[in-house]
Image (cartoon, grey):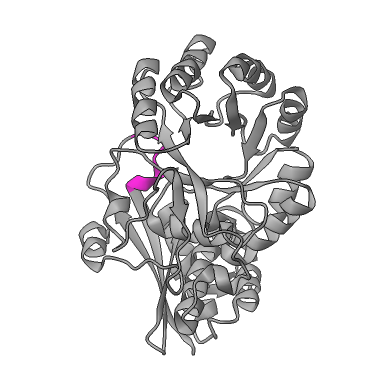
Amino acid sequence: MKITDVEAIYLRQPEVKQQCDSGQDALIIKVHTDAGITGIGEVDSNPMAVKGAIEGPFSHTTAAGLRELVIGEDPFETEKLWHKMYRGNIYGGRRGAGLHAISGIDIALWDIKGKALGMPVWKLLGGGFRDSIRAYASSLWGPTPAATHDLARRYVDKGFTAVKFGWDPMGQDEATDVALVREARRGLGVADLLVDAGLVWDAKTAIRRARAFEEHNIFWLEEPLLPDDYSGYRKLAEAVDVRIAAGEEESERKSFIHLMDEGKVDVVQVDLTRCGGFTEAMKIASLAQDRGLPVANHGFTTYVNVAAALHFLASIQNALILEFVAEEETTLRDEITRERIEAVDGFVKIPTAPGLGVELNEESIAKYRVG
């Protein structure tokens, strides 16, 4: 079997709001083969930058479009192809969008392998640690503390035992921050409350907020600092008892080593569409396990990302919990795959169909495709 083509397909809702909701558009990757098997992947990044990294022409031996590097190759050779893509675009691909582009292709390659062998990706990865996993409903904060309370009640009523709220309007002032957490807790009752600060504070402010949130018993405090502030993360983690979670901004294992060893975070968050795909995510999880750290996924986009995360979390011993987007106003993720992944009583089943276990709805792809 040989790779014949790679597509980077940009999808976008008619209206994209000025908010931190990456489910309003999507970059879907298709890897085609001469055996008639097409693998799908996804990238959550700057979509057009990634599209250029994939579809761009050969420039020179350390700056090549990834499509050019993999055409004609055997899709089963995922480790070899990962390193070929990394080395072939090392000028622009060591971190960020270039590495994200590798992620989408790698996910699609594993989908191809699973489809060709009639096996789910988690089985190819040697997994089988669990057949379902607890999920937390992932949502933006309500525009006010009172609105957040009402959202919390709705998620609990849907059966979730853990809920995360994040980003705006957190970070405006201490009174608002505390009120948001207080009302979220009041709405959730005994369910676990996860707080995503959205990169809004310095280390001293984050310490102060974490201590203020203690009475509301939060499950973790996520990304309170800018991602490169590893010394700040270390100060925060050493000063408070609450778990500190981060990792969605990192790409490939060396950056995660900095986060774990310098930043001393308590929970390692891995986004399959940014970290380097399955091939790199498994290495990151092993590094985390060596340090006694649990791993959670990150994903606020489509069911392609969710499916990839489920296979990954089923394949590692140190999986903690699944991020499951519950944002109510986004429609794109519910239309572009034929399958809808659902949480039942706060748990999501691990897919058992070959490959990722999801297929694209080509009518919706055509509907939302840009360019």
Residue located 31% across and 61% down the image: 337
Check the picture and name the quadrant holding the C terminus.
bottom left
Q: Is residue 54 magenta?
A: no
Left or right, residue 219 beside residue 266: left
Residue 99 seen: no
Report x, y in % for residue 70.
53, 79
Q: In this view of the protein, which residue sits in the foreground, 115 or 74?
A: 115
Q: Magenta residues?
A: 18-24
Residue located 37% across and 25% down the image: 142
| Total tally of numbered discs in the picture | 0
Report x, y in % for residue 318.
67, 52
Above-or-below relation of 51 to 259: below
Above-or-below relation of 332 to 114: above
Report x, y in % for residue 189.
46, 23
Q: In this view of the protein, which residue sits in the foreground, 344 or 312?
A: 344
Above-or-below relation of 331 to 358: above
Left or right, residue 90 beside residue 102: right
Q: In this view of the protein, which residue sits in the foreground, 9 or 116?
A: 116
- Location of residue 144 by image quarter: top left
Report x, y in % for residue 323.
49, 45
Residue located 74% across and 55% down the image: 287
Q: Does the magenta stretch include residue 19?
A: yes
Residue 247 seen: yes
- Location of residue 86 by image quarter: bottom right
Most extreme residue toward the top is: 175
Residue located 36% across and 51% down the image: 342
